[in-house]
Amino acid sequence: MNTLAQTKHEWFHNVRGDIIAGVVVALALIPEAIAFSIIAGVDPMVGLYASFSIALVISIVGGRPGMISGATGAMALLMITLVAEHGLEYLLAATILTGILQLIFGILKLSSFMKFIPRSVMIGFVNALAILIFTSQLQHFVDETWIMYALVALTLAIIYLLPRLTNAVPSTLVAIIIVTAIALIMNTGVRTVGDMGALPDTLPVFLIPSIPLTFETLAIIFPYALALTVVGLLESLLTASIVDDMTDTESDKNKESRGQGIANITTGFFGGMAGCAMIGQSVINVKSGGSGRLSSFSAAVTLMFLILVLGNLVVQIPMAALAGVMIMVSIGTFDWQSLMNIHRIPKTDATVMVVTVSTVVYTHDLAIGVLAGVVLSAIFFAWKVSKVEVDKSFADNGTKAVYAVEGQLFFASVTDFLEKIDYSDKINEAVIDVTHSHLWDDSAIGALDKIETKFEQQNIKVSYKGLNRESSKLKEEIGGLSKASGH
């Protein structure tokens, strides 16, 4: 497929579905953007402008069509201290720097590091996110009457049952319209979008953050920008992988990294806070029929249209309707199959999944949870492959001992390996047979040096058999260093 045909396909292969999905997404973006602004300690318009500009820019330059990006809770949590201590202008500068770092990340094609995130961590990430989406809706039930619960139940019922009758219109959009109409007609008194904060009444304008361009300023914003970069890309690339699976299509992760960078740079100059891909909104988009770039574009345009033109109607949408939509999203996001199969998968994988979920839910930080899962997976993997077997036999009338090594020799296995070498045998030569082994690091070479040293002290010759090319090269380069240094 040539570039022009591919571009046409990404934008116009699903016009109706993308536009309708974009409208649904835009409705759900408003309360979230306002809520995330409040978390970060800034005016609601900062989050709304961010969701508009990021969704608009990413629809053009992103690498994953059909994925929605905007202001997110994970990013907002990282901004609290910066905003409290230095104010909005420094947040905008940190947003621009975040974009620059993400752009560099994409140019250097570092998204390949995603392959080091195991499936158990990915599933844990998704399940934790589903739990966070659900728990974030509980605040809307505080001090509310039974009417709130009834409207949420009605929303859930419409979203669940309508697709069984027809898929002509998204059930989420129908639910929002019906529940809003009921709330207005019956004057229920439940909280609305307008109760969460005032909506802006103008389009965002270009501005340069009013901060001193000094090394001191860089020292203030760089740690925050780096944290935002890592969390933003982690959430974006994991979300891209999830949308890949949902749509059974591939995406360009490095292009997505560059796109996220360009979107955040743009947002910083237009008064918005840093953002990234939104798994909840992306799931809403795909489930509502959106799969192309037009869905993100229409979500951005609809968002601004709703705020500027229909702001008076939007503020009357009851939070019950949007809470119901998000609860259904959390139910759809959670991988229920993983819960049913948890007793079948290896205990180490199950442990990694539970630790990832627990850490994210406890810290409300996706990056920390994923990092914990990856580190634990690495430890379990090292433990599994550190098992080494040594079979000793004798040759030449008992004057030669042959140690046949089976397993990987690296830092985690050399202790067990060394314990299996016997220096008390009355022999003339010791042969280390590594035909079924591999030398991976300095620790492995150091262990061989130690064996050589001990045998040579008893005038016993040491030779090797079966060294593969990589192991032989490593031994040639650093073998004997630990002997020479006396270790």
Image (spheres, rainbow, N blue to C red):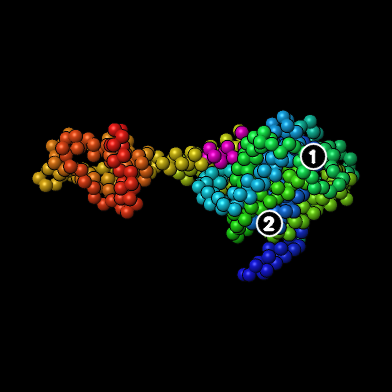
Disc 1 residue type? Pro
Disc 2 residue type? Val
- Give the CA distance from mark 2 to mark 1: 26 Å
274 or 24: nearer the viewer: 274
Whether residue 335 is visible, yes or no, is: yes
Magenta stretch, residue numbers:
363-373
Answer with left or right where residue 310 lies relative to residue 386: right
Answer with left or right where residue 283 lies relative to residue 403: right
13 or 206: nearer the viewer: 206
Whether residue 235 is visible, yes or no, is: no
Q: Give the residue at x 53% y 37%.
A: 372
Answer with left or right where residue 317 lies relative to residue 67: right
Q: Give the residue at x 87% y 45%.
A: 201
- Going from N to C along the chain, the mark reached first, 2 or 1, is 1
The local crowd at label 2, few if under 14, some if 14 to 19, many if 20 or more residues have their Cα within 10 Å, is some
Q: Give the residue at x 74% y 63%.
A: 15
For the N terminus, the quadrant is bottom right
> Circle 2 sits on which residue?
61
Q: What x and y, as percent, mark residue 360?
A: 60, 37
Task: In the rendered view, tell whether residue 158 sits above or below residue 219.
Answer: below
> Circle 1 sits on which residue?
44
Task: Tell me which secondary structure the magenta stretch mostly adopts.
Answer: helix
